[in-house]
Image (tube, rainbow, N blue to C red):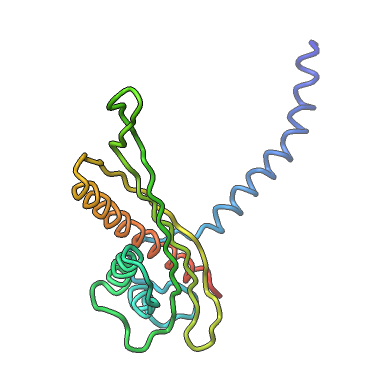
Amino acid sequence: MSLHEDSKPAVARRLRPALLAGLFLCAALASACTVRPLYSNAQLSAGSDVGAAEELASIAVKPVKTRYAQQVRNNLIFALTRGAGEPATPAYSLDLGVTKLVQSAATIQVTTDQDEPTAGTVTLTAAYKLAETGTGKVVGTGQRSISSSFDRPTQEFASYRAQIDAENRAARELAELLRLAIAQDLTKRQ
């Protein structure tokens, strides 16, 4: 008998409990998975008597103060209600705060001592707090951010207009991220 044959059963006996424990752990993790279709109309939370679309449509978004925040708010209302407008009797209230950061992304050297920006990036960041209207109980909070790039031509108005267009693009994408985050928060609530 060789040494390899004697040690093989002992190693197999030691690995068998670890393999079984790993198998049970994987089965437990898979059973806790709550994957569901993204655009289904099933209830978002246990005990809810309305579908996902109706529950999202019952969210009132509070007014904001800046142009880019208003763009995010308008797109979010449209996404939540599927174009129906704000609800008459909201079940939830959404407090939204949006900030903007504009940066130069690339520069070229026009002369030996002067650089001119040729591209920029607009970053919109939204912090939100979702609460039940009747009780004021916070259902979810979070923060999402999105960036949008734009060209900066030499004409001042064209550069400003390109920045505004980038803000509008970022606002549309940020509103969609917020809608998904809010749906996840409603799913997690008890």
Left or right: 168 as drawn, with respect to 55: left
Residue drawn at (45%, 74%) of the image: 95
Percent position of residue 115, x then y: 33, 31
Against 46, is 109 above or below? Answer: above
Which one is in front, 106 or 72? 106
Percent position of residue 148, x then y: 32, 48
Against 152, is 54 above or below? Answer: below
Percent position of residue 21, x then y: 69, 45
Q: Residue 112's quadrant in the figure?
A: top left
- Which quadrant is the C terminus positioned in? bottom right
Which one is in front, 124 or 115? 115
Against 23, is 188 above or below? Answer: below
Residue drawn at (60%, 47%) of the image: 26
- Which quadrant is the N terminus positioned in? top right
Percent position of residue 103, x then y: 39, 44
Task: Find the residue positioned furthest to the top.
Answer: 2
Residue drawn at (30%, 55%) of the image: 167
Q: Residue 74's quadrant in the figure?
A: bottom left
Residue drawn at (45%, 80%) of the image: 48
Which one is in front, 160 or 85? 160
